[in-house]
Image (tube, helix red, strand yellow):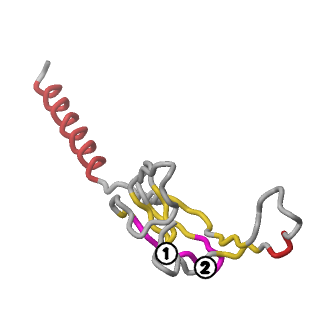
């Protein structure tokens, strides 16, 4: 190669290097943040009063279902209960994960990582179901 060709080749390589550097130095386009995935538990608290047994004596006109508005809903690590245990608890024996209060329609949402949980609703007397 002649010295002219070597100079042209070096100049071309330098130009390619500068172009590659300039392309790499441009700011990356703004990426929109991915929406946060909502995970957890959601539901509705209802208060059922009356006899809802299918074989009831026809006195079902006195039955009522009301929204459980303003009740504290708590999410705990799983609670293992025996078949003979009461559905009412004064204290839950596992760690609390999250808690909230139900809205006027009894709706609630609790954020939590995927997994198994026990959900309890606190009634006025402090008992949890």
Closer to the camera, 74 or 114? 74
Q: Is residue 1 left or right of residue 15?
A: left
Closer to the camera, 25 or 36? 36
The percent position of residue 67, horizontal first and vertical second, equals 67, 75
Residue that mark 1 sits on: 72
Q: Among all residues in the image, which is located at the extreme right?
A: 58
What is the quadrant of residue 55 in the picture? Answer: bottom right
The percent position of residue 61, horizontal first and vertical second, equals 86, 73
Return the mark for residue 69.
Answer: 2
Q: Which residues are magenta?
A: 98-107
Q: Is residue 29 above or below residue 58?
A: above
Residue that appears at 27% across and 42% down: 20
Please say whether residue 94 is one of the residues in the magenta stretch: no
Look at the image and tell me whether residue 112 can be seen: yes
Q: Is residue 32 left or right of residue 57?
A: left
The percent position of residue 85, horizontal first and vertical second, equals 48, 55
Q: Is residue 16 above or below residue 33?
A: above
Residue that appears at 49% across and 73% down: 122
Badge 2 crowding class, 10 Å Cα cut-off, few under 14, some 14 to 19, many 20 or more, is some
Look at the image and tell me whether residue 38 can be seen: no
Residue that appears at 79% across and 72% down: 63
Q: Is residue 6 above or below residue 44?
A: above
Q: Secondary structure at mark 2?
A: loop
- Quarter in which the N terminus is drawn: top left
Q: Secondary structure at mark 1?
A: strand
Badge 1 crowding class, 10 Å Cα cut-off, few under 14, some 14 to 19, many 20 or more, is many
Cα–Cα span, label 1 and label 2? 9 Å
Residue that appears at 19% across and 29% down: 9
Q: Is residue 106 left or right of residue 22?
A: right
């Amino acid at each position: 190669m002649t010295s002219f060709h070597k100079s042209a080749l070096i100049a071309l390589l330098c130009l390619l290097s500068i172009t590659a550097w300039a392309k790499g130095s441009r700011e990356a386009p703004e990426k929109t943040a991915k929406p946060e995935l909502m995970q957890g538990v959601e539901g509705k608290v209802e208060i059922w009063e009356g006899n809802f047994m299918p074989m009831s004596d026809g006195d079902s006109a006195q039955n009522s279902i009301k929204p459980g508005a303003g009740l504290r809903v708590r999410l705990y690590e799983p609670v293992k209960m025996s078949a003979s245990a009461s559905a009412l608890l004064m204290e839950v024996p596992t760690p609390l994960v999250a808690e909230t209060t139900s809205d006027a329609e009894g709706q609630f949402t609790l954020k939590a990582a995927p997994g198994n949980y026990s959900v309890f609703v606190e009634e006025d007397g402090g008992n949890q179901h």
